[in-house]
Amino acid sequence: MRIDIITVLPELLKSPFEASILKRAIKKKLVSVLLHNLRDYSTNEYKQIDDYQYGGGSGMVMMIEPIDKCISKLKEEREYDEVIYMTPDGTILSQGIANELSLKKNIIILCGHYKGVDQRVRDQFITREISVGDYVLSGGELAAAILCDALIRLIPGVLGNETSALTDSFQDDLLAPPIYTRPAEYKGWKVPDILLSGNSAKIEEWREIEANKRTVERRPNLLE
Ligand code: ADE
């Protein structure tokens, strides 16, 4: 998989890909992540990429031309399955969307800034708009990092234990059950006996019950 990220703040997006699971996935060549500085595509001597909005109103708008130039250059080099725009008015990211996107070959992610992008960018180039939640970030970069993390860890071979993504919260529309590790008792606080029983059928049954309980209590909407 190849992910091209278009941003005005590439430095904000470096560190997530330089640590832990994402770094290892890149090193193993299971994914490549390329950052493109939108200012490099500015046609203006001041490297300007935004301008005042037509009709008046506060806040700058990202201009279409640098974005067009960057996306067109990438599309000349290869075909893309999706051109995603990170925006608070997009579809809320879910495990289902992450699963679907993790199967794509090439995607572009455009990070919004200021008030957002000229609507013509969205109309002409964007195939999907994604939000990471009902709150406003100062730019799309951290949202793009969240999206990349959620989908890269699903690419086969990225997680050491192949089954562990399958037992994540949300993979079966349920939250994950409680988990424990050693010691079996700490300051009098005990691990549930069933987990120490060695009876894997009973343990599975307990986990299912606990996952359901947790989902009913915390996120009943997942069961609708
Ligand atoms: N840009 C600003 N806020 C955002 C959000 N909540 N999701 C995606 N992109 C954003």
Image (cartoon, helix red, strand yellow):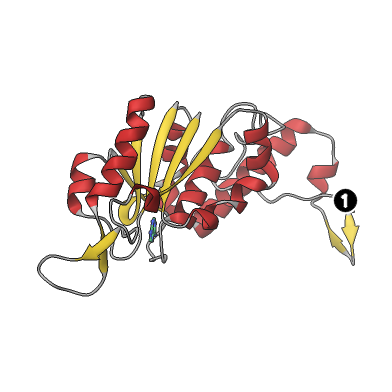
The foreground one among 171 and 151 is 151
The foreground one among 22 and 40 is 40
Residue 86 point in image, percent of width and height: 37, 51
Residue 50's place in the image compared with 144, above or below, is: below
Please, which residue is most extreme toward the bottom here? Answer: 58
The picture quadrant where one finds residue 50 is bottom left
Q: Amino acid at mark 1?
A: Arg
Please, which residue is most extreme toward the front here? Answer: 45
**Disc 1 target residue:** 182
Residue at the spot x=58%, y=51% of the render? 14
Residue at the spot x=61%, y=46% of the render? 17
The foreground one among 62 and 30 is 62
Residue 115 point in image, percent of width and height: 28, 65
Residue 63 point in image, percent of width and height: 24, 55
State yes or no: Cβ of the residue under disc 1 lies below 8 Å from any atom of ligand 1. Answer: no
Q: Which quadrant of the render holds ligand 1?
A: bottom left
Residue at the spot x=53%, y=58% of the render? 12
Residue 118 visible: yes
- How crowded pointer 1 is (Cα within 10 Å; few <14, some 14-19, many 20+) is rated as few
Q: Is residue 39 left or right of residue 30?
A: left
Q: Is residue 179 left or right of residue 175?
A: right
The picture quadrant where one finds residue 124 is top left
Residue 28 point in image, percent of width and height: 67, 29
Residue 170 visible: no
Q: Secondary structure at mark 1?
A: loop
